[in-house]
Image (cartoon, rainbow, N blue to C red):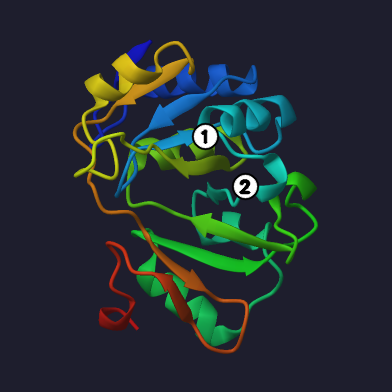
């Protein structure tokens, strides 16, 4: 199903429809403040395995991050952080960043890497955040890649739907996505280390 949801004021009924699918172990493709993401409820083992099949990766090799609603939501899934890190998160989120933290025991074992870390996102997109808020759990965040030699990521929701309609339950049309991924920042040591330069400019904000 291709479901149109406007990012400015997401229709609550449409959000409920998406959450119902997630609760039943379904997969969705959804907009963020960067590229479109493929996701499911982080507590559903079978749904996560399906995402691995679509992405052509083994579960033990997967580095999925996940989407939280806000800072309070993040705190449940990461080990305690210092004041400097908290201030940095407050300045940058919601925003186009993925932050790597030491995972708390609430992160499903299948989603924390061998290093026991987890990637966290709070995108500046109300569709993604309202889904997470109503669901009550974060959702998986993994990017939709494009087969095109020039474009790395698919940006047109209608074309995404044509490609993935038989593999996912809902593709959300939230308008055109971007072709630049989030900036990935490692916060597991005393220094913030940028692992991937993306849309977010950390030095401009901290």
Task: Name the residue: 73% across, 31% down.
Answer: 45
Task: Name the residue: 35% across, 84% down.
Answer: 206
Q: Quadrant of the N terminus?
A: top left
Q: Position of residue 7 (x, y in %)?
A: 26, 35
Q: Nearer the viewer, residue 200 or 134?
A: 200
Q: Position of residue 191 (x, y in %)?
A: 53, 88
Answer left or right for 130 relative to 110.
Answer: left
Q: Quadrant of residue 156?
A: top left
Q: Position of residue 119 (x, y in %)?
A: 56, 59
Cα–Cα span, label 1 and label 2: 9 Å
Q: Are marks 1 and 2 in contact (CB under 8 Å)?
A: yes
Label 2 Cα neighbours within 10 Å, binned few <14 / some 14-19 / many ≥20: some
Task: Name the residue: 46% across, 34% down.
Answer: 38
Label 1 Cα neighbours within 10 Å, binned few <14 / some 14-19 / many ≥20: some
Q: Secondary structure at mark 1?
A: helix
Q: Quadrant of residue 195?
A: bottom left
Which residue in the structure is indicated by mark 2? 62
Which residue in the structure is indicated by mark 1? 55
Q: Secondary structure at mark 2?
A: loop
Task: Name the residue: 32% across, 14% down.
Answer: 2
């Amino acid at each position: 199903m291709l479901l149109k949801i406007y990012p400015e004021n997401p229709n609550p009924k449409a959000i409920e429809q998406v959450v119902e699918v997630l609760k039943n172990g379904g997969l969705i493709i959804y907009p963020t403040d960067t590229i479109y993401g493929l996701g499911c409820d982080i507590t559903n083992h079978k749904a996560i395995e399906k995402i691995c099949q679509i992405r052509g990766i083994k579960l033990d090799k997967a580095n999925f991050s996940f989407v939280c609603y806000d800072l309070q939501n993040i705190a449940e899934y990461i080990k305690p952080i210092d004041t400097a890190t908290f201030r940095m998160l407050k300045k940058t989120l919601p925003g186009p960043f993925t932050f790597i933290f030491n995972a708390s025991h609430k992160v499903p074992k299948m989603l924390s890497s061998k290093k026991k870390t987890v990637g966290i996102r709070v995108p500046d997109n109300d569709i993604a955040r309202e889904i997470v808020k109503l669901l009550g759990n974060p959702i998986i965040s993994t990017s939709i890649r494009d087969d095109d030699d020039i474009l790395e990521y698919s940006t047109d929701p209608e074309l995404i739907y044509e490609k993935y309609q038989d593999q996912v339950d809902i593709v959300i049309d939230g308008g055109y996505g971007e072709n630049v991924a989030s900036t990935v920042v490692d916060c597991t040591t005393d220094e913030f280390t940028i692992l991937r330069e993306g849309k977010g400019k950390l030095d401009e904000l901290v």
